[in-house]
Image (tube, helix red, strand yellow):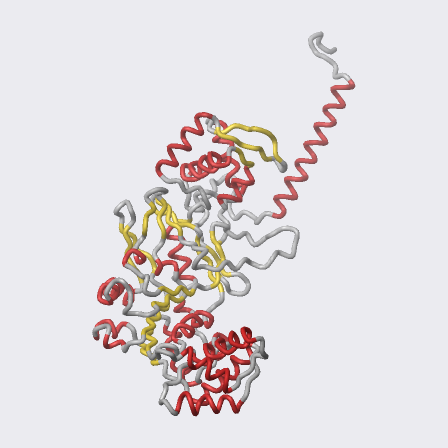
């Protein structure tokens, strides 16, 4: 006999129980499907999960090193406090943003950043302004959050991509180092296919490029030293990955420079979901070729701090890691050659460099690039034997032969749409070179053809290589030479 205190279930309550049962069954099914796609665990479920190893990246199917997306903030080398500061400064600059926008802006996966957003909401630093699609919210700062964001901004105004730890960057340079690249003769021909270059020159350049250490390119001006230096990087692998910014003990150092680096995005994913799991704090760029000339100073070789923002900028040699750094017009810099060489004499030998942060801390970073010193002077006139020993290759870029000069003239005429004439070329060589004992230079065919092209445009005549147009071009070009 039932107790008087017991209550028989009503039909409405029974229906609700059935609905809850179906809902629970549906959630169990979703959980089973999710677990079926997850990698199997190799430990009992009762054991605490160990911290995943901090792998900076791994090679893809083509052998290219890829930065792997982190599963936790700890695996990303970040603390809750560092990411909290970036989130609050971002919201202070935008007034409001969704969690997924913050994820895209900081380049941190949404599933990693979402628990931190809930924690900030619990601490009353942010508030929900409204709902957003896909289980997300629109966040805005509270008064307490705004005050904290201002304090963070006083220390450092940076609120871009979350930084990558210095150790992860050092590991990435090891994985993409030039010393592992060994360009073949075919690679060099491909890199210099748009230049008319002697096979003997390529034979001398090949071993120097394979060394990955450094070289002098010297010779008379106008023979293509800079053009050669700028194409050397093409002989190596085409792309590398670098961090957008590096974090060192709370300090932010920018590494990616749009003025020096060319972004090379991965091909679009063919499927509905992108399973590549790339860490978006890194950016894929063309293997860098950085050219500096007479403007180079000692400040460019050290970490520079913007005192208004408290954000540091990486030095030029660090931006050129895994690529080529060309010191053009070597010997004409604002600093003396001794200052430059004394600064780099140890890095060239040891393949690493020491840099000073604004805090006074000294850090060790890779010095992994092919340095090309391009100069119009002989190396022995600029540096002593101790430094020459550390630059094992000294390659002279000589004047072109007459046959090579004619090929350049003909090729440049065709490229610029100027009708070529062999008789006019003979006239040029006889009257304006042999008769006056003038030196041949690789740049002269291009410069003379451009003079003729501009002359014909002005006179409204067909661009053509003639004795008249050549006389005009030579008179202008060689007026004081």
Residue 333 position in % (x across, y down): 29, 65
Q: Residue at x 56, y 40 (%)?
A: 100
Question: Looking at the image, which residue sits at the far top?
Answer: 4
Q: Residue at x 48, y 31 (%)?
A: 119
Question: Looking at the image, which residue sits at the far right?
Answer: 11
Residue 157 position in % (x across, y down): 39, 40
Q: Residue at x 39, y 57 (%)?
A: 171
For this rendering, which residue is in front, 290 or 449? 449
Numbered label tally: 0
Question: Which quadrant of the figure contains the N terminus?
Answer: top right
Above or below, 70 relative to 116: below
Residue 420 position in % (x across, y down): 55, 85
Does residue 466 appear in the picture of this structure? yes
Q: Residue at x 46, y 88 (%)?
A: 428
Above or below, 428 relative to 311: below
For this rendering, which residue is in front, 127 or 19? 127
Identify the image quadrant of residue 182. Answer: bottom left
Question: Which quadrant of the figure contains the C terminus?
Answer: bottom left
For this rendering, which residue is in front, 340 or 471? 471
Residue 245 position in % (x across, y down): 41, 50
For this rendering, which residue is in front, 316 or 333? 333
Above or below, 19 relative to 465: above
Identify the image quadrant of residue 335. Answer: bottom left
Does residue 205 appear in the picture of this structure? no
Q: Is residue 388 left or right of residue 230?
A: left
């Amino acid at each position: 006999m039932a107790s008087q205190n017991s209550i028989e279930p009503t039909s409405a309550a029974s229906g609700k129980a059935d609905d809850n049962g179906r809902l629970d069954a549906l959630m169990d099914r979703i959980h089973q499907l999710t677990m079926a796609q997850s990698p199997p665990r190799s430990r009992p479920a009762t054991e605490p999960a160990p911290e995943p190893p901090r792998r900076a990246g791994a090679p893809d199917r083509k052998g290219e090193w890829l930065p792997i997306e982190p599963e936790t903030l700890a695996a990303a080398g970040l603390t809750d406090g560092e990411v909290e500061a970036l989130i609050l400064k971002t919201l202070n600059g935008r007034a409001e943003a969704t969690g997924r926008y913050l994820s895209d802006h900081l380049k941190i996966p949404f599933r990693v950043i979402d628990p931190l957003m809930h924690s900030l909401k619990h601490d009353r630093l942010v508030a929900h302004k409204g709902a957003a699609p896909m289980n997300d919210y629109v966040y805005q700062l509270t008064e307490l959050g705004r005050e904290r964001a201002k304090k963070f901004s006083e220390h450092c105004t940076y609120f871009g991509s979350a930084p990558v730890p210095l150790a992860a960057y050092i590991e990435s340079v090891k994985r993409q180092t030039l010393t592992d690249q060994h360009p073949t003769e075919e690679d060099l021909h491909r890199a210099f296919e748009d230049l008319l270059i002697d096979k003997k020159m390529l034979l001398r350049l090949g071993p120097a490029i394979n060394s990955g250490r450094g070289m002098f390119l010297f010779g008379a001006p106008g023979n293509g030293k800079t053009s050669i230096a700028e194409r050397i990087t093409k002989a190596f692998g085409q792309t590398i990955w670098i961090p957008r910014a590096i974090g060192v003990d709370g300090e932010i150092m920018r590494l990616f420079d749009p003025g020096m680096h060319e972004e090379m995005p991965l091909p679009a994913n063919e499927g509905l979901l992108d399973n590549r799991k790339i860490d978006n704090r890194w950016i894929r760029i063309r293997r860098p070729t950085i050219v500096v000339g007479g403007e180079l100073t000692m400040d460019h070789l050290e970490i520079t701090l913007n005192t208004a923002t408290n954000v540091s900028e990486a030095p030029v040699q660090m931006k050129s890691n895994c690529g080529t750094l060309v010191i053009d017009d070597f010997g004409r810099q604002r600093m003396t050659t001794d200052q430059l060489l004394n600064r780099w004499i140890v890095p060239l030998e040891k393949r690493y460099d020491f840099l000073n942060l604004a805090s006074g801390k000294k850090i060790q970073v890779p010095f992994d690039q092919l340095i090309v010193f391009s100069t119009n002077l002989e190396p022995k006139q600029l540096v002593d034997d101790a430094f020459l020993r550390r630059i094992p290759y000294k390659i002279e870029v000589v004047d072109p032969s007459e046959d090579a000069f004619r090929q350049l003239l003909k090729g440049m005429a065709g490229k610029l749409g100027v009708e070529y004439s062999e008789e006019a070329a003979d006239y040029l060589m006889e009257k304006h070179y042999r008769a006056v004992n003038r030196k041949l230079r690789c740049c002269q065919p291009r410069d003379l053809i451009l003079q003729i092209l501009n002359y014909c445009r002005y006179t409204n005549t067909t661009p053509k290589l003639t004795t008249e147009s050549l006389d005009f071009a030579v008179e202008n070009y060689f007026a004081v030479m």
